Image: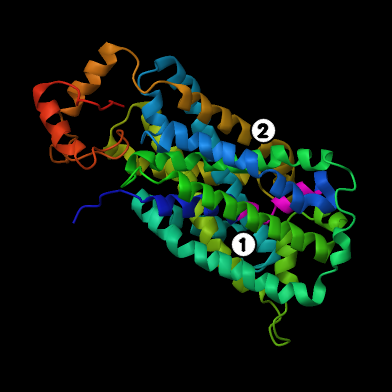
Amino acid sequence: MPRRDQVDPASIAVLLIVVVLATLVFFLPRSLAAVAGRDAWLAVLASTPVVALVVGAWYAFYFRPGLTPLDRLRFHPLMRWLVLPVLVAYATYHAGGILGETVLLTVVVFPETPVWAFHATMALTTWVLVAYGRETLARLGLLVLPVMVLALATNLLILLPGNAEWAQLLPLLEGGARPLLGGLPVMVAATAETLILTYFADGLSSRHGVLRPLMLAAAGMVVLLAGVALAGIVVLGPGETARAVAPTFILARLARPVPVMSRPEVFTISAWLLGIALKLALFVYAAGVTARAGLGLTERWQGPVHGLMTLAAVAVAAILFPDSERWDWQFTRVWPLVGMAGLVAGLVAGLLPARAGRAAGRAEERSLGQAPEGMPAGRHRPGSGPAPQGDEAPEAGRAAAAGREPAGGRMP
């Protein structure tokens, strides 16, 4: 049975949490504590409107009309060549940064394992996941997120009762509202990573009721991140949280459920490693699809292109993130700028009309009458705009046969 390559709104909502928290839950508390001190957890909560604004923009530009960034850029040659390289670089840089975290994993959790073994294992896993398509990635998120949240909650429940010093949270807002505002750029850069989810917009099984799951997922992500930041403050203190490269790694190592377990953090980090692998696959998928579109290659080249982008991510990890010191420098100095660049590219693409001019519209209308090679006529091709749904499908078929646009419809 062929894959439909479709996803549902619940899967998109789950992926939103995974994309942000799979890696950033370990490092964002450090950046937030550096600018907000003991009020780092309040800075996360104060960023809720900005997070909602970014997610709402993706909904309005992409999920509601069922269009991906590639659909938006299709009929705009100038913007296509300006924005597509930014999107490829954005996704590849993040993929390399995710792989670079394996250096920290080897130092903290698996010191006996060489770095190349982690890179090779993660790269191979990523290539396999991407080869199965976005429907598999979305369904995997439904399995991975509960494991991640359960591991995190268990770790905090074991750690906090005997190690928390709640007095370190006081006094609240000692520096006024300015520290809270200082955390906004960090949270915006983190939320901008959800841009890669817009590549799933044309594969939604139903575009109705997408906004509510997205906003609930964004709220859940904010609450989880605020809880981790609060745990870092009350256990490590604001000073140590701001100095540590990955304070959440330290929290994982401090939890001791029973005396006979000397390294319980292995279970916690291994659970989150599932989310890290999924997040890496999502960024490689976005980089590969965008690179193929930019090069004008057909879909038969998608597998090799994904393989090349996986190798590119490994190269980025080896060059830009060779050790924990370089990783820390990249995360604090370069990552926020890259995040803002991706946000701007996503907004620029989203503001473009989906069809530019009647000539382009007629060309696209003619192309819709031809099925891609290897695909039966009439079957919707993922990545080519939203598929007709419900009562639109018969009308769309009749309109295509007559050479006209469906009544009340809009061609991507």
Q: Main secondary structure of the magenta part?
A: helix
Span colored in magenta: 23-33
Q: Residue at x 20, y 36 (%)?
A: 392
Q: Amino acid at mark 1?
A: Pro
Read off the residue under disc 1: 114
Q: Residue at x 39, y 46 (%)?
A: 209
How far across and how far down the image is residue 94, in percent?
Answer: 57, 42
Q: Nearer the viewer, residue 291 or 315?
A: 291
How far across and how far down the image is residue 219, in percent?
Answer: 59, 51
Is 185 left, or right, of 238 in this rendering? left
Nearer to us: label 2 or label 1? 2
Is 92 left, or right, of 318 in this rendering? left
Q: Residue at x 53, y 52 (%)?
A: 217
Read off the residue under disc 2: 337
Residue density around tag 1, few if under 14, some if 14–19, many if 20 or more, within 10 Å = few
Is 398 left, or right, of 62 in this rendering? left
